[in-house]
Amino acid sequence: MSKRGISPVIGVVLLAGIVLLLVVVAGYAVVGVSENALGTAAVHSQSNYDVQIENELDKQLVMELRGHQDLDPDTEFILSINDKEVRKWQGKGDDEIHIQCLYPGDEVELISANGDTTVLLEDFQVQRPTSCTKYNTFEKKFPNAVVDGNSHQVRDDYNFGLSINPNGTGNAAAPGNGTRHIGKVSLQNPWHHVEVYEDKSIEGLEPPVFVIVMVDNVHYGDIPKPSNHESVDPDKYYNWTDDPPSGLDPGEDAFNITTNSSGVNKVIPRDSNDDEYEPTNDVYIVFQPGCEQSTVKFVNESAGFDNEIYKDGELVIPNTNDATEGQTFSAPGTGCPNGGEWR
């Protein structure tokens, strides 16, 4: 008995039927997803959103939200920076938000939320640093951004990766006038002092630049000098882990900026023998962040320790006692993903 297969004509018809069925199923799936997406959007608003962001050098980041007049009353807008919520509001009409103290690589995200549903309206990577006029008023120097005049912590640890190792591998002053190996102390430590210059060059380095005064000890019993600072306890030996006494900003008056005859803005330390400025008058540097490479310029030192300066764990200045005034050092780059730039 001979074996017989399906005729070619019938086979083609069956194949066409299978293909048609697959197309219908796929079409149904696509239509279903689209309807769900439209339904979710309709929960939030019957208007179209338009988010405009301006991020220009040395200016605020301005976010303009337009077109949500028909907003569902239960819908909120949520603004986050680096996944940290900084503002939540119910939009009525147009909104304009001003943000300062952002740096290349920071992420600004805006969503609308209604119940359990959310819609991403904007996901923006900061390309250039914004102005930061409130820089030195923060409780912590680097983690904060300013949103419409209010300060919010948006970074867990943003200190440019700079640190000082007091006396290198040797022992340095410890509480009670003892000595021990201290190890690296981050620039974020409140005993250090930092000032940002956004609109002018310092020591020949183009803005934004940071004048940094690092401390290599805080442990002497008469430093800070009690007669100069009423809040200082004369019987206390301070430690790195202590907050500075109330009202004392270490290093705040430790230097002046003067313009020399060549038009260069110079960092001029105060009298190194005046203990009014202790303890933060030990190591003066200027830091210029860059995407691929940063620059550290050594200005001055009023300290006896052979201090080491690090950037992201890499040794930049092996010994501050051997560095000369105006000497520049190359350092690792500072956070510029996605095509961002510092200047």
Image (cartoon, rainbow, N blue to C red):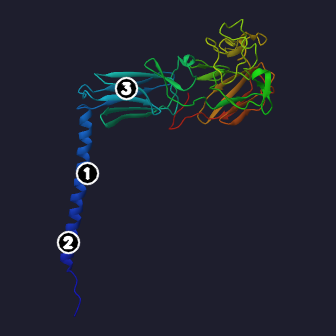
Horizontally, residue 321 falls left or right of residue 37, namely right
Q: Measure the alpha-carbon separation of dots 2 and 1.
A: 24 Å
Q: How many labels sit on residues?
A: 3
Q: Is residue 248 above or below residue 128?
A: above
Q: Kindly identify which numbered label has been placed on residue 238.
A: none
Q: Residues within 10 Å of mark 2 (few under 14, many from 20)?
A: few
Instruction: Tell me the quarter of the image containing the N terminus.
Output: bottom left
Q: Amino acid at mark 3?
A: Lys
At horizontal 24% and vertical 35% (from top left) the residue drawn is: 43
Instruction: Tell me the quarter of the image containing the C terminus.
Output: top right
At horizontal 75% and vertical 11% (from top left) the residue drawn is: 275
Secondary structure of residue under mark 3:
strand
Q: Residues within 10 Å of mark 1 (few under 14, many from 20)?
A: few
* Residue 323 can be seen in this image: no
How far across and down, in percent of the image, does residue 318 sit? 77, 32
How far across and down, in percent of the image, does residue 310 sit? 70, 32
Q: Residues within 10 Å of mark 3 (few under 14, many from 20)?
A: some
Q: Is residue 52 above or below residue 13?
A: above
Q: Amino acid at mark 1?
A: Val
Q: Quadrant of residue 193?
A: top right
Label 3 or label 1, whichever comes before in sequence order? 1
At horizontal 70% and vertical 25% (from top left) the residue drawn is: 297
**147 or 265, which is in the foreground?**
147
Secondary structure of residue under mark 1:
helix
The residue that label 1 is drawn on is 30
The residue that label 3 is drawn on is 88
Q: Kindly identify which numbered label has been placed on residue 14.
A: 2
Q: Amino acid at mark 2?
A: Leu
Q: Nearer the viewer, mark 3 or mark 1?
A: 3
